Each structure stands twice: as structure tokens, then as C-alpha cells.
Image (cartoon, coloured by chain):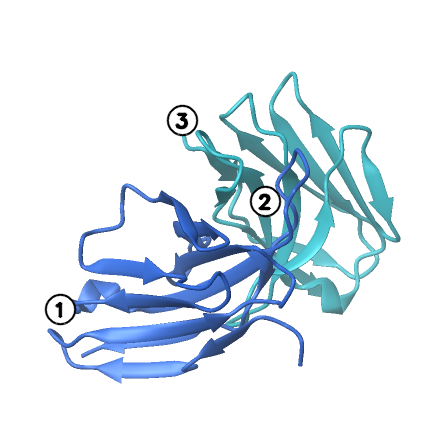
Amino acid sequence: DTGVSQDPRHKITKRGQNVTFRCDPISEHNRLYWYRQTLGQGPEFLTYFQNEAQLEKSRLLSDRFSAERPKGSFSTLEIQRTEQGDSAMYLCASSLPGWGRVAEAFFGQGTRLTVV
Amino acid sequence: RKEVEQDPGPFNVPEGATVAFNCTYSNSASQSFFWYRQDCRKEPKLLMSVYSSGNEDGRFTAQLNRASQYISLLIRDSKLSDSATYLCVVNGEGSQGNLIFGKGTKLSVKP
């Protein structure tokens, strides 16, 4: 399978615990995005990398959230001290460089987080 | 004004109908526009990019109106399998890399 891969697919955690999600992008894609989606809403932008550089973070992203892409390949998203409001689907997407525009992004199947 | 706005619907149409969705965006400097489709509890999947001259892919036609800052999606001869949520996507303010999604328009095609 050469698509975007996310792990785990589902995560249930107790409030206050830390969780980490992994995303493996399509191999030749240098851009990687993280989104969060709750029921009835569109995906909400969290952050984006070009290679290993984190180029943008949403103002909505609290300091409990951190993302890394250390070698410009896979990425991790960590949430510290989880809260019930963090329950959502966390989506990762990747794309090629845009050559003057933003290229189409392709999504993984997501990690569904439930905080109890 | 929200960055990307869509009518949430739902649009309930019979098979064979033609249906159109509109989406407005706030950043006049946006350069990249897409329509994605999302099935229930699945990830968004790219339906089509939207180019300045408009583009067509089978039963689907996308149009861009830069002056009025809206994009549209037309689906002809609707199929039951077209039932999904359609997400309008525009690159956001301040960065070429930030893709902003609308909340989506839900389409339900009935037999």
C-alpha cells in the first residue's frame, strides 16, 4: 500500500494521559499536514511541514499539542494531558511541492481519539 | 467572514438529478482550489482540482469565479453512490501550504 498510513487507527485514553500518533506520508511527498475533525465539521488545520521544517501552526493549537517530522519522512503528533475536548479524528495528509500553487493533498484513514 | 463557507445542506435529490454546490472564500490571494468528497466516517478524498478556466471530469464540473470569490461544483445525472459530504478547499491566508476546508455540503441521492 503506497498511500498515507496512520497509526493507530483508534485510541482510547484517560483524561490527563499523553498520546502520540504516527503518520507515514506517500514516499515522494515532501509536504505533510495534520488536521483534526469532529462530527459534522470539516477538517480543521493543525500544522504543516515541508520536509522536516514545521512551517505553520494553527493559532487554535494549544501548547499541549506538538508535532515533529525529524527526518522529513514520517511525522508524529503528541497531545499531552489530554482533555475530553480532544476527542476527534486526527487526519494526516501529504502532497508534492506545488510549483507555484498548493498541490492536492492525500489523506490517511485517520486516528480516532476518544478521551474518557 | 469565515475563510471558507458552504451551505451545509442536506441536499436531497432523486437519482438522475443535477445538483450544484457553491462555496465562498475570503482570501482574495488564494491560488489553489479543490473539491473533496468524504463518506461517513472515512477520510476526505480528492474529487477534483478547480482551475481558473473551469474543468470537467465526467459528470462533475467545477468553476471558479475569482471576482466574486466563489467556486462551484455541478453534478449531473446523480447516482446513489454520489451520496456523501462535499468539502470545498482553498489555500489559506499567510501561507501557500495551509489548506482550509469548509464544513462540507451533505448530498443524499434517493432512488
Amino acid bearing label 2: Cys
**Left or right: B25, with B19 as reference point:** left
SS of the residue under disc 1: loop
Answer yes or no: are tags 3 and 1 on the same subunit: no
| Cβ atoms under marks 2 and 1 closer than 8 Å | no
Whether residue B102 is situated above or below residue A84 in the rendered picture? above
Chain A pictured colour = blue
Quadrant for residue B64, please give it.
top right
Q: From the image, tell me which residue sits under label 2.
A: B88
Name which residue lies at 76% across and 35% down. Answer: B51
Residue A5, given in percent of the width and then of the height, sits at 54, 75
Q: Amino acid at mark 1?
A: Arg
Residue A16: image location, x then y, percent: 11, 73
Q: Nearer the viewer, mark 3 or mark 1?
A: 1
Q: Residue at x 27, y 67 (%)?
A: A78
Q: The residue marked by circle 2 belongs to what chain?
A: B
Please give the residue where the numbered disc 1 appears in the rendered image: A81
Asked whether, in this view, residue A57 is left or right of residue A23, the answer is: left
Alpha-carbon distance for marks 2 and 1? Answer: 33 Å
Residue B81 drawn above or below residue B74: below
Three-letter amino acid code at disc 3? Arg
Q: Which mark is residue B1?
A: 3
Q: Nearer the viewer, residue A108 or B82?
A: A108
The mark total stands at 3
